Image (spheres, grey):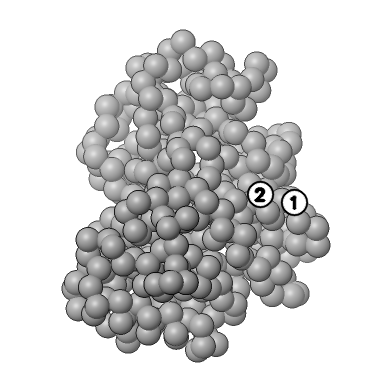
Amino acid sequence: MGSGPVHITGQGVRAATTAGRTRHSVVTWGAGAERQDAGPADRGYRMIVRTSVGGTDMRIRLSNAFGEHPVTFASAYAGLRKQGAELVRGTNRRLTFRGAASVTVPAGETVLSDPLPGELAAQSDLVVSLYVTGAQGPTTGHGMAMQTSYAAAGDHAAEEGAANWTDPIGSWYWLDAISVETSTAISSVVTLGDSITDGWASTADRNRRWPDHLSRRLQAASGITVKGVANEGISGNKVLADGAGQAALNRLQRDVLSQPGVSTVFLLEGINDIKAHTGVTVDDMIAGYRQIIDRARAAGKWVVGATVLPYQGWYEYDAAGEAVRQSVNDWIRTSGEFDAVSDFDKVMRDPCDQHQLLPLFDNGDHLHPNDKGMRAMADAVDLSALRRDPLSVR
């Protein structure tokens, strides 16, 4: 194991081809990268994530996509959580980068760790601990994790106890993807969306976002080879315009198409464009969807579209926006341009008033589903429609 830091250059990380192999890398967890405020220059981050598909030789991806300066990860460890910030004894192991214990990532770049030998089970509470030095200016992370993680002063990444991890945090920092090695028959789906996919209004720390429920369904299903789920929802995100995170069109390559072992892109996005009162038209939305479909297909992906949920009662609701939503949903259902469609609008709307969420599924703000609504969305997905046959994964 080398002693000095590795310095990463070039245009980021590219997925290796799976041609001629019986095993390949598949994303088991992901979170959309966003620009975050400047953080302390020297700090530890202990981040809790839930895996989807299991496998061997786990790797983490660290992103400095929105940084304006290099950032050094002086130490990185991964283990299994016992409770809170405490790890299961004997599971916390050092991660390396081209054999070195630390790595410096330039502004705008990403880095993959070396594979960590051994098995990582599906549906594991994985703990990734980082000690970050030299951080300046904006950081890269995921603001609304819906999961409590922890921070510490100094380098305590190797520790399995929780004594020094006393600062709860609600975001993930720098960590934006985790992958494992598994059979080439196995693949993952990436859910691309906004706060509904990100899990807002689901119960925090309980993994009750609709992609979490989908992940559990996929793990339990027989005859289904899509087993991984990477949640690339960002609260407030739009298809067409930057704002809360880069627009879906602008982050598609980094957050979705660059992930390994992805067979399927599941798109549920558009309500933030529609309700923003910026003059977005049906044709604008269709053009944006078509770009996502075309780019995903060019990368060999199967593309599933979901209809946009009702939102009457939300403070930005008006008749003009509702007309756009209805027309967009008609196009999603009938155009045939998606490879498959999940009609979430039909599942979630009130049969007595189709402009609003069913009260049973409404968290109270009339836009975001509650835990029951999240479960209903996941249960409505036709698992057999999540991929083509034969599988084509890049």
Identify which residue is drawn at 58% across, 33% down.
Answer: 126
Across the whole image, how many numbered discs are drawn on residues?
2
Residue 334 vs residue 44: left or right? right
| Extreme-top residue of the structure | 163
Residue highlighted by disc 1: 220
Give the x, y percent position of residue 383: 68, 65
- The alpha-carbon separation of the residues under discs 2 and 1 comes to 6 Å
Q: Quadrant of the N terminus?
A: top right
Residue highlighted by disc 2: 216
Q: In which quarter of the image is the C terminus?
A: bottom right
Give the vertical position of 327 relative to 248 (above or below). below
Report helix, strand or loop for mark 1: helix
Circle 2 crowding by C-alpha within 10 Å: few under 14, some 14–19, many from 20: some
The foreground one among 59 and 345 is: 345
The foreground one among 374 and 388 is: 374
Report helix, strand or loop for mark 2: helix
Rendered image quadrant of residue 36: top left
The foreground one among 174 and 188 is: 188
| Extreme-left residue of the structure | 278
| Extreme-bottom residue of the structure | 335
Tag 1: amino acid: Ala
Identify which residue is drawn at 46% across, 27% down.
Answer: 46
Residue 339 vs residue 209: left or right? right
Give the x, y percent position of residue 180: 66, 46
Give the x, y percent position of residue 179: 61, 47
The answer to whether marks 2 and 1 mark residues whose Cβ atoms lie closer than 8 Å is yes
Identify which residue is drawn at 25% across, 68% down.
Answer: 317
Tag 2: amino acid: Arg
Circle 1 crowding by C-alpha within 10 Å: few under 14, some 14–19, many from 20: few
Q: Is residue 3 visible?
A: no
Give the x, y percent position of residue 274: 29, 72
Q: Is residue 384 visible?
A: yes
